[in-house]
Amino acid sequence: MLALAAHPDDEVLGAGVWLARLARAPAVAFLTDGVPRARRWRPPRYTSATLYRQARRREARAAWSRLRRGTRLFFAPFRDQELAFRLDGAARWLAAVAARVRPGLILAPAFEGGHPDHDAANLLAARLGAARDLPVWEFALYTARHGRLQRQRFPAAPGWTRHLRAPEAARKRRAFAAYASQRGTLRALDAGRESLRPLAAHDYSRPALREAAVYERWGFPASARRVAQAFGAHLAGAKIACACSCSPTR
């Protein structure tokens, strides 16, 4: 199984226990370095992008040493918040990882308008699944519904939510603790819940939400319209019709 994470910590939050328990040979591909270009989006003590990047990699390794030793980790060179505009290079990088891992299933963040990198990871998963004839599952992180933030659940479409047993939730909290730089973000999230579903039929040429994306509300440098345009341009350049790329492989 190959899990795609837009940033180090996405995979643990969304499906860490599910991945650690069910995968015979789990691997995680981190599609960005987790380091936004603008300092305002980094924890105050990380004034150096290089040191922050190194910290996030160390944290990922520590988290997986607590969840499942032997999990293979791959780190892409792309910047946090910019994956939507680096899709051609990211698709090539991911194809090389998949050739090494030879997964039987792809796992990725949901297409839910929470973070542009999450949505980009979902598109890349859909493409990889179609190219390799593999099933793709998506896990909920955060989205908006009627203007309110909604975490770790699918708001309008059916999904499978697993409420972890106490020992599993405790194990996941230990993995959370490894991501010390993300403590403020993870504090608001539920270590006892993982919500997953087979990849839905997404139209990547349109914003994931009819209302404002979460990242637009937060003031990220990219709008949902611009992200959707980048997705459409990538699919057109790859000569993939949206209807094809959005259809999950079952």
Image (cartoon, rainbow, N blue to C red):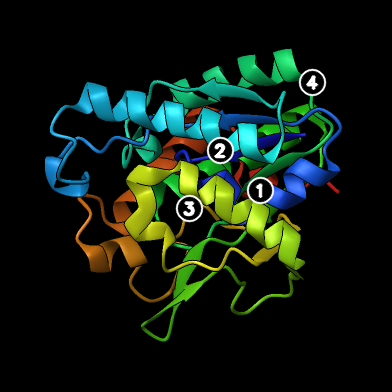
User: Tag 1: Cα neighbours inside 10 Å, few (<14), some, or many (≥20)?
Assistant: many
Q: Which residue is mark 2?
A: 63
- The residue type indicated by label 4 comes to Arg
Q: Which residue is mark 4?
A: 102
- Residue 108 location, x and y as percent? 62, 45
**Looking at the image, which is closer to me, 64 or 91?**
64
Task: For mark 4, give the secondary structure.
Answer: loop
Q: CA distance from mark 1 to mark 3?
A: 29 Å
Q: Residue at x 37, y 42 (%)?
A: 230
- The residue type indicated by label 1 comes to Gly
Asked if one can make out residue 110 in the rendered structure from this viewpoint, the answer is: yes
Horizontal side of 53 relative to 186 (left or right) equals: left
Sequence-wise first label, 1 or 3: 1
Q: CA distance from mark 4 to mark 1?
A: 20 Å
**Looking at the image, which is closer to me, 145 or 152?**
152
Q: CA distance from mark 4 to mark 3?
A: 29 Å
State yes or no: discs 2 and 1 in contact (Cβ < 8 Å). Answer: yes
- The residue type indicated by label 2 comes to Ala
Q: Which residue is mark 1?
A: 16
Snapshot quadrant of residue 131: top right
